[in-house]
Image (cartoon, rainbow, N blue to C red):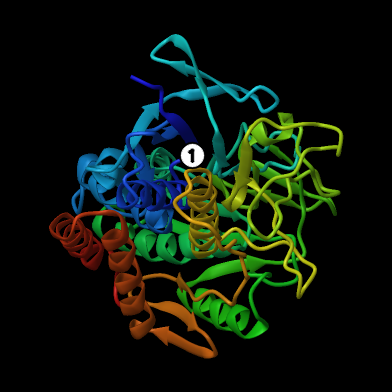
């Protein structure tokens, strides 16, 4: 039996999983699954639905246990690719040889090597600590499901141990804002239920002049007003210079004590991307062209096969603004669609199933987004329309359902969504 040509996708995040599903369906449609297969690689056998991590970090154990939360926030990869010519490999990437087409993996304590004809880099991002002394050692990030559980457990420990609690969130982006609003309300609830004498304070420390810097000033103002109403202190124009146990020191020398520091102040491309012989922009990020294809570091280098990149793993410069596209889920999914269509197009041409194949181009757009800020309140922007309050929160739920329907069978998607809705309705306090 002839060996199948392999389309390897590294990373099962929003973009990577979407690309795997799209390519798998097209291979089946054109009856090419006997000659080609998709190999999807990730260190986890599930995808984390990151927009709900702030919920997991603030959901009481009485409302939902660990397994309940995991079942609605993590999506099994095998469920999403069931019935498609997609082979999932759970493993840690140890080396990428783009000159010879080899990928080295650590899998179940063994080394494994796979080859590719087409490679899609969807490695995502990792927490960026900006080389701030002591920051990584003395803070908790919020990037994974396990991170959210650590935050939740630490808050509960503090309530049991101390009469006064100070929680500092480093970074006023969407993740920091979402967590600050929800944790502020949860602390109020814990005070009533567990420790009426305990006083808890929440603050956001951000380096920029306003929170939600990448968003419009109108969004920032609304978010600031909401957080202030909830009792969250916002400290702007404040760069953290170093962190010691329970103490953050700003560049101007001011000291901010804390019992828990959650760092949401930045992300960077996967460190694996730094080792590849690919073209980069001045900040060191791998750039892609508008077909989502990567280029060799220098013109004389010859890459093996075709290499594409999407999502947080790469840098796409918006030709209209001259700025890098923000790392948002909708952009990663759109980029995945473009890369997947172009890979399939090349295969159809190669197999003489099409005489003229259209090349698809990624065109950035003003993506809709929803920013929940404590309880049943969110700010939703759809085109020029801005919706806030309970209706914004309702739209957030519809966005989550729509995503689950895109990667799960109908019955399972609805079941998962209703389970999450039941838990988070209890969790999301009114007000």
Rendered image quadrant of residue 35: top left
360, 323: nearer the viewer: 360
Rendered image quadrant of residue 204: bottom right
Is residue 208 visible in the rendered structure shown here? yes
Q: Give the residue drawn at x 44%, y 85%.
A: 388
327, 176: nearer the viewer: 327
Q: Secondary structure at mark 1?
A: loop
For the N terminus, which image quadrant? top left
Is 27 displayed left or right of 201 in the figure?
left
**With respect to residue 223, does 137 lie above or below?**
above
Is residue 45 visible in the rendered structure shown here? no
Is 279 displayed left or right of 431 in the figure?
right
Residue 252 in picture, x, y percent from top left:
85, 54
**With respect to residue 274, does 347 lie above or below?**
below
Residue neighbourhood size for the residue with mark 1, other residues' Cα within 10 Å, grouped as few (<14), some (14–19), many (≥20):
many
Q: Give the residue drawn at x 76%, y 59%.
A: 238
Q: Which residue is mark 1?
A: 11
Rendered image quadrant of residue 299: top right
Is 65 displayed left or right of 55 in the figure?
left
Q: Give the residue drawn at x 86%, y 33%.
A: 300
200, 278: nearer the viewer: 278
Residue 281 in picture, x, y percent from top left:
82, 49
For the C terminus, which image quadrant? bottom left
State the residue lying farthest toward the bottom: 385
Is 295 displayed left or right of 182 in the figure?
right
């Amino acid at each position: 039996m002839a060996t199948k040509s392999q389309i390897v996708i590294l990373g099962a995040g929003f973009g990577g999983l979407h690309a795997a599903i799209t390519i798998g369906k097209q291979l089946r449609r054109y009856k090419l699954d006997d000659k080609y297969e998709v190999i999807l690689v990730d260190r986890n056998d599930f995808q984390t639905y990151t927009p709900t991590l702030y919920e997991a970090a603030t959901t009481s154990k009485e409302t939902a246990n660990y397994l309940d939360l995991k079942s609605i926030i993590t999506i099994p990869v095998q469920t999403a690719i069931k019935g498609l010519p997609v082979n999932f490999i759970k493993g840690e990437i140890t080396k990428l040889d783009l000159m010879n087409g080899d990928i080295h993996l650590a899998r179940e304590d063994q080394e494994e090597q796979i080859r590719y004809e087409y490679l899609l880099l969807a490695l995502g991002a990792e927490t960026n600590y900006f080389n701030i002394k002591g920051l990584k050692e003395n803070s908790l990030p919020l990037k994974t499901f396990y991170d959210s559980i650590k935050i939740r457990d630490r808050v509960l420990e503090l309530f049991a141990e101390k009469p006064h609690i100070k929680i500092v969130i480093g970074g006023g982006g969407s993740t920091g804002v979402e967590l600050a609003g929800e944790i502020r309300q949860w602390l109020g609830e814990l005070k009533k239920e567990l420790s009426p004498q305990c006083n808890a304070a929440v603050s956001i420390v951000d380096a920029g002049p306003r929170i939600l810097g990448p968003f419009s000033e109108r969004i920032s103002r609304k978010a600031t007003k909401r957080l202030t109403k909830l009792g969250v202190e916002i400290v702007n124009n404040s760069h953290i210079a170093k962190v010691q146990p329970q103490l953050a020191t700003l560049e101007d020398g001011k000291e901010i004590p804390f019992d828990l520091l959650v760092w949401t102040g930045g992300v960077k491309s996967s460190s694996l991307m730094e080792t590849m012989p690919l073209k980069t922009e001045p900040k060191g990020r791998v750039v892609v062209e508008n077909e989502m294809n990567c280029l060799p570091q220098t013109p004389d280098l010859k890459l093996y096969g075709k290499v594409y990149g999407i999502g947080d793993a790469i840098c796409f410069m918006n030709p209209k603004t001259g700025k890098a596209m923000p790392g948002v889920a909708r952009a990663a999914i759109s980029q995945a669609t473009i890369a997947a269509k172009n890979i399939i197009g090349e295969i159809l041409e190669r197999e003489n199933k099409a005489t003229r194949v259209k090349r698809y181009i990624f065109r950035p757009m003003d993506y809709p987004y929803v920013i929940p800020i404590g309880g049943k309140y969110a700010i939703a922007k759809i085109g020029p329309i801005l919706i806030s309050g309970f209706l914004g929160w309702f739209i957030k739920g519809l966005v989550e359902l729509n995503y689950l329907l895109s990667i799960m069978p109908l019955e399972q998607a609805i079941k998962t969504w209703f389970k999450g809705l039941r838990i988070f309705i209890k969790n999301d306090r009114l007000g």
